[in-house]
Image: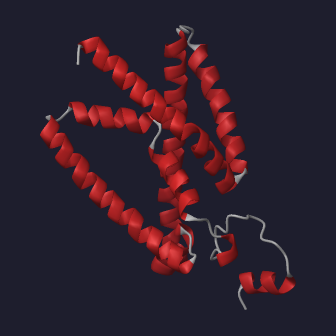
Amino acid sequence: MTAAELRQEAGTEPVDPDYPVTPVPASARRGVVSISVVLIGFTVFAPTLMAGASIGAAFRFSEFLAVLLVGSVVLGAYVAAIGFLGARTGLTTVVMSRYTFGTAGSKLVSVLLGGTQIGWYGVAVGSIGQMTALAFGWESAWAPALVMIGVSALMMLTALYGYEGMYWVSLISTPLILVLAFWITALALTEVGG
């Protein structure tokens, strides 16, 4: 009998409601809108937009569109395949990697996944600290660091709430970032005359 079956038989709730190492039961699965909000929240944030701007500046417009199309198709196919498997089976990425690579091999997947998240966290916190200090004209070396500490604390608080934390942060921040992106684009176009 598996640990999940023992818990179910005993009637106890899992320690982590996000089911990191067991299949997600049908009653706990999220809908398309909820998942879409979180996925869009992952991709629409300032460092991603800045990286896109850097890549865009490195190519002619037609080449950039081709790079954008190829990258979107590759990433979209990958995410769609994983999403399809997860939706059909209720398995998380960690559980899928255990079936695919075994317990020992899945540890490498976990290290890679964790490493990318730590890197994302560092880039996000650093970017927010630098941009906030720049936007407010704070010239002290401590200003970006203090903003980074504050943002880190907020990010850790949302992490305590797992998926729900990500959902609410994405639901609030994504529209605000999109408004800011279009506003900055309009200002830039006005400044250069079209």
Figure check: 107 above or below 8: above
* Model colouring: secondary structure
Q: Quadrant of the C terminus?
A: top left
Image quarter for residue 91?
A: bottom right
Splitting the image into 4 quarters, where does residue 53 fall? top left
Residue at position x 49%, y 22% in the image:
131
Residue under the point 60% across and 40% down: 172
Q: Quadrant of the N terminus?
A: bottom right
Where residue 114 appears, as percent x and y from the top left, is 54, 54
Indicate the position of residue 50 as horizontal and vertical percent values. Answer: 37, 32
Indicate whether 50 appears above or below 43. above
**Can the viewer see residue 97 in this picture?**
no
Residue 149's place in the image compared with 158, above or below, is: above
Image quadrant assignment for residue 155: top right
In the rendered view, does 60 fall on the left or right side of 37? left
Q: Position of residue 169 (x, y in %)?
A: 62, 43
Residue located at (60% from left, 27% from top): 148
Residue 26, position as x, y percentages in the image = 65, 77
State the residue at coordinates (58%, 76%).
90
Q: How many marks?
A: 0
> Is residue 95 something that shows in the picture?
yes
